[in-house]
Image (spheres, rainbow, N blue to C red):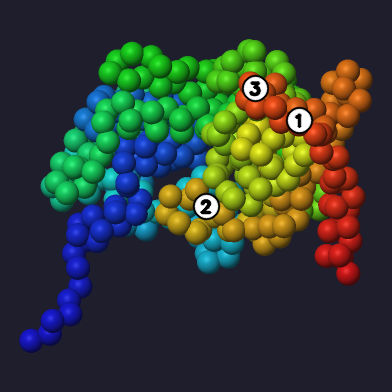
Amino acid sequence: MARVHLLDDELINKIAAGEVVERPASVVKELVENAIDAGAQHIRVSLKDGGRQLIEVSDDGGGLSPEDAVLALKRHTTSKLRTADDLFAVSTMGFRGEALASISSVSRFTLQSMSRELAEGIRVHHEDGRTTNTPWQGTFGTSVTVKDLFYNVPARKTFMKTSAAEFAVCHEYIQALALAMPERGFRLLHNDKEMFSVGPLPVAEGWARGEQALRLRAQAILGEEITGKLVYVQHVDRHAKVEGLISPPGLDKASAKHIFTFVNHRWVKDKVLRNGVLRGYHSHILRGKFPVALMYLDVEASLVDVNVHPAKTELRFQYGSEVASAVAMAIRDGLRQGAWSSASPNPSAAFSASYSPAAGSGRKVEPVAPIDFDLLLKREAESRAL
């Protein structure tokens, strides 16, 4: 008797959910990305008990036909890829076709959708491996409800954090996505209380969103005091187009949590980009301190691989070093041309306002001569060209 056998689809989905669905924030991320790919301008996220009890994501996007809605819950079904070549030029937020199948296998899942092109919508419910669907009438767009996450996987459920901790991760993601896409509106509710809300903003045509849009969105999240001090930067070369808002010398933080990097509208936590940000500041900031930086990169889709991990938060650049240098140069140009230059002839040697030597230490702090980092970057680029 053969000991090797084919697993059934429901078990396969639960196994896949181990990578795709780690916590409530993973569900929020996947569902919101689907809403963005559907062309939604307004996205509403409602949570209860930090998302452990309820996650509901509603949008005003194009909606799904009844046939597509039923098919969407099956593994590896997607509207975003057609051929293998498409995988090497991904321009959408999602593409793997795993999210809905994985989420529905570990929750009580309901999808309601109404296409603008049809007179009737559909309601699809999946629970305990059984899927049912019925006709539905409602507002245009799609609403997905996820109840009792991991109710059928007790071991996974015990690893979820407290309600406050899970909500904090969801909140951080929605705010980061709002920064990434000022042209879209986001609303977040927790236990029926509105916690965050921003409307869509007009953005400039072309690859750059424009200083005004970035400032207005940053102000809603970081606050007026910090945003008012940030400097708008822009840099274009053949490897990347970069724009952003950066803090001047003297405005710093104790951790890197205020460094946001976005690639092709996607929020990513990438070491290459973070190193590029820190290289850009170099002698302008003290060791152990971090800047406030919102860096937006537009990179040709064929030169960046987002198919690294199901969570899609990691990237692989074909020209990683050059992209990091583009980020560094954007920051260096902004620091060199900043309005504070006239007030501080040598901002490179200026100390952080948050730093002061210990009282009575008796140590004399000697300023360090700034390194000509522009020259280093130029030499680096010349050596690569050779």
The span from disc 3 to disc 2 (Cα, nearest Å) is 46 Å
| Residue positioned 37% across, 23% down in the render | 139
User: How far across and down, in percent of the image, does residue 112 sit?
Assistant: 30, 33
Q: Residues within 10 Å of mark 2 (few under 14, many from 20)?
A: some
Q: Nearer the viewer, mark 1 or mark 2?
A: 1
Which tag, 1 or 2, sits closer to the chain's start?
2
Instruction: Determine whether label 3 and label 2 are within 8 Å by CB.
Output: no
- Residue 136's tag is none
Residue denoted by label 2: 314
For the residue labelled by badge 1, is the local secondary structure a helix, a strand or a loop?
loop
Residue denoted by label 3: 360
Residue denoted by label 1: 364
Is any atom of residue 119 visible in this view?
no
Q: Nearer the viewer, mark 3 or mark 2?
A: 3
What's under tag 3, amino acid-wise? Gly
Q: Residues within 10 Å of mark 1 (few under 14, many from 20)?
A: few
The span from disc 1 to disc 3 (Cα, nearest Å) is 11 Å
Instruction: Determine whether label 1 and label 3 are within 8 Å by CB.
Output: no
